[in-house]
Image: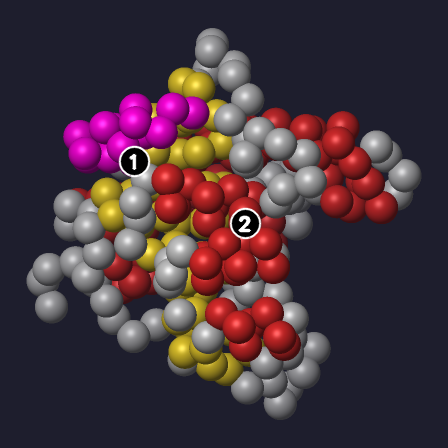
């Protein structure tokens, strides 16, 4: 199959994944692999928007649980996503992929402010657009930001790249009898409380009929396989 299955996608990357096995910070080998995978998909003519988390640097929810003000800790988490966005931009441009970073919190010296029409124009010009700083609002996760941006730019699918190859009925790391799903409905994800994305993001996708494809980013070439329509991961529909 030589023609991509999708013309425009939104790829959601977890911040934790960028840390690799070191647990925190940015693992350069990992980010270079991700950039290589995105570059392969980009070469097929797929328009790509990316939302990236910040959990490898700072987790607002965790800090809030330890007593920090939730709004302040969430803003700190948003700034962490911008650090990751700039690192990914650098890695992509080393792969000769034209890239723009747009942030929901204005920081004109390092990135463009998020403007929907400008983002779409960048995509039409075959630039990868990385969306930083979440939604710009506390109490919303980067999962919700990904669902929101996907719908704003008219993406055909929200691709959630994680450390796990599929969605399971329970944590496959803790339970050897965990069963994988090839396809699952939004409502079943919500009813079972499966940790695919946060419930707000899943509800948003359900309301707007935006399919979610969850797959592993640890296997090289998976982004290309996903955009080409190969049967990988789990589809939430």
Main secondary structure along the magenta-highlighted residues: helix
Q: Residue at x 90, y 39 (%)?
A: 67
The tag on residue 105 is none
* Outermost top residue: 109
How dense is the environment of label 1, judged by Cα within 10 Å: few (below 14), some, or many (20 and up)?
many
The front one of 167 and 225 is 167
**Marks 1 and 2: which is nearer the front?**
2
Residue at 53 percent across and 59 percent down: it is 203
Q: Which residues are magenta?
A: 114-128
Position of 51 compared to 195: left or right?
A: left
Q: In the rendered view, would you say 202 is above or below 26?
A: below
Q: 221 or 105: nearer the eye?
A: 105
State the residue at coordinates (61%, 45%): 141
Splitting the image into 4 quarters, where does residue 219 fall? Answer: bottom left
Name the residue beneath numbered marker 1. 128
Q: Which residue is mark 2?
A: 143
Q: Is residue 90 above or below residue 162?
A: above
At mark 2, the secondary structure is helix
């Amino acid at each position: 199959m030589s023609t991509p299955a999708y013309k425009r996608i939104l790829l959601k990357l977890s911040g934790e994944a960028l840390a690799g096995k070191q647990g925190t910070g940015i693992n350069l080998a990992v980010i270079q692999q991700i950039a290589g995978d995105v570059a392969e998909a980009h070469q097929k003519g797929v328009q790509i928007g990316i939302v990236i988390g910040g959990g490898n640097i700072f987790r607002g929810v965790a800090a809030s649980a330890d007593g920090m003000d939730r709004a302040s800790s969430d803003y700190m988490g948003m700034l962490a996503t911008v650090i990751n966005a700039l690192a990914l931009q650098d890695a992509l441009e080393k792969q000769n992929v034209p890239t723009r970073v747009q942030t929901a919190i204005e920081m004109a010296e390092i990135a463009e402010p998020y403007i929907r029409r400008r983002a779409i124009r960048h995509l039409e010009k075959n630039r990868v657009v990385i969306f930083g700083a979440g939604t710009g609002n506390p109490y919303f996760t980067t999962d919700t930001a990904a669902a929101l941006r996907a719908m704003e730019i008219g993406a055909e699918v929200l691709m959630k790249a994680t450390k796990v190859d599929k969605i399971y009925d329970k944590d496959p790391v803790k339970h050897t009898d965990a069963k994988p799903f090839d396809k699952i409905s939004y409502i079943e994800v919500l009813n079972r409380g499966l940790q695919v994305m946060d419930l707000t993001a899943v509800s948003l996708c359900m309301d707007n009929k935006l399919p979610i494809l969850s797959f592993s980013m640890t296997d090289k070439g998976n982004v290309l396989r996903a955009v080409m329509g190969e049967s990988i991961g789990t589809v939430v529909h």
